[in-house]
Every structure is written in C-alpha cells, then in structure tokens.
Amino acid sequence: MDHDCLFCRIVAGEIPATIVHETETTLAFRDIDPKAAVHVLVIPKEHYADVVALAGDPAASADLLAAASSVAEGEGLTGDGFRVLFNTGRFAGQEVFHVHAHVLGGEPLGPMLALR
Ligand code: AMP
C-alpha cells in the first residue's frame, strides 16, 4: 500500500467510498464527481500507477476487466451500452495515479471525445 495514494487509502478503509462491487483483488466504487448517470471506478487493490504498469501483470489486468464487466452488469448497463476508459498521463488528464477503469453509462454518452 502507498499511504500517499488516495485509492490505496480507500482500499484500506481509511477514506469512505460508496462501494458497489468487490473481489479478492479489485474494488469498485462510485465516482465522487460523476460525469454520467452511472459512473463507477474499478481499481485493483494492489497499487499500479496506470494501465501501462497494470498490463505488466496479466492476471491483475484480467481481474480488473472482469470486475468492470460485472459492474456494468450489476448497474444494468449491458442492454443499452456503456463506456470503459482509462485516463493515462498528462494528455488524458489523469488525476489519480492508481489505475482505475471509469465505467460510464445509464444515459447516452455523446461523442467519445469532446475535442472533435
Ligand atoms: P482520472 O482523471 O482518470 O485520474 O480520474 C480520477 C477520478 O477520481 C475523477 O473522476 C474523480 O472525480 C474521482 N475521485 C477523486 N476522489 C475521489 C474519491 N474520494 N472517491 C471517489 N472518486 C474520487
């Protein structure tokens, strides 16, 4: 655990979160500032800074993807569709350097990127 990492502290129970799904290796909780009707963050409990670091651990990567899929099912998103994204680094505006999949849905999400 990285004690300076916000999401490690959520995993440790030091910071409250609205948890919607949990496995031995993953945790999913509602985004504090939702960008869609449903906005859940899915993280590995172990600390990886970003999706590039996570990709070095195939088992952890598979667990995260499976958890994101379970969240989408649990939130009732699979019928109309949903979006999963990983902001990575400066150009993407990554704010929290503990890898997290954003699971977004519950309403039409508009174009993939606002810039184009
Ligand atoms: P990113 O820009 O991809 O790093 O996304 C970080 C996300 O974490 C943002 O959508 C924030 O709203 C969200 N966030 C920040 N602090 C918390 C928190 N304490 N609980 C839940 N979500 C948070």
Image (cartoon, rainbow, N blue to C red):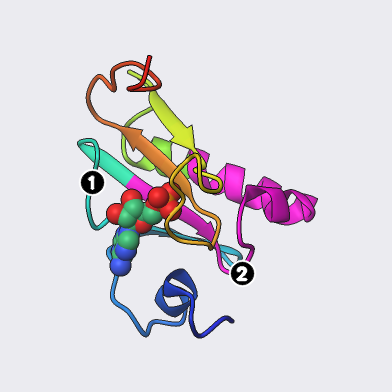
In the image, is 91 to the left or to the right of 54?
left
Q: Nearer the viewer, residue 56 or 107?
A: 56
Q: Is residue 107 magenta?
A: no
Residue 79 in percent (x, y) is at 36, 20
Which residue position holds label 2?
Answer: 47
In this rendering, is residue 45 above or below 70? below
- Indicate which quadrant contains ligand 1: bottom left
Which residue position holds label 1?
Answer: 34
Q: Is residue 30 visible?
A: no
SS for callout 2: loop
Please report contact status of discs 1 and 2: CB closer than 8 Å, yes or no. no
Disc 1 Cβ-to-ligand 1 distance below 8 Å: yes
Q: Residues within 10 Å of mark 2 (few under 14, many from 20)?
A: some
In this rendering, is residue 86 above or below 16? above
Q: Nearer the viewer, residue 46 or 89?
A: 89
Q: How crowded is mark 1: few (under 14 residues within 10 Å), some or many (20 or more)?
A: few
Q: What residue type is labelled 2?
A: His
Q: What residue type is labelled 1?
A: Pro
Q: Which of 57 and 48 is in front in this view?
A: 48
Residue 26 in percent (x, y) is at 55, 61
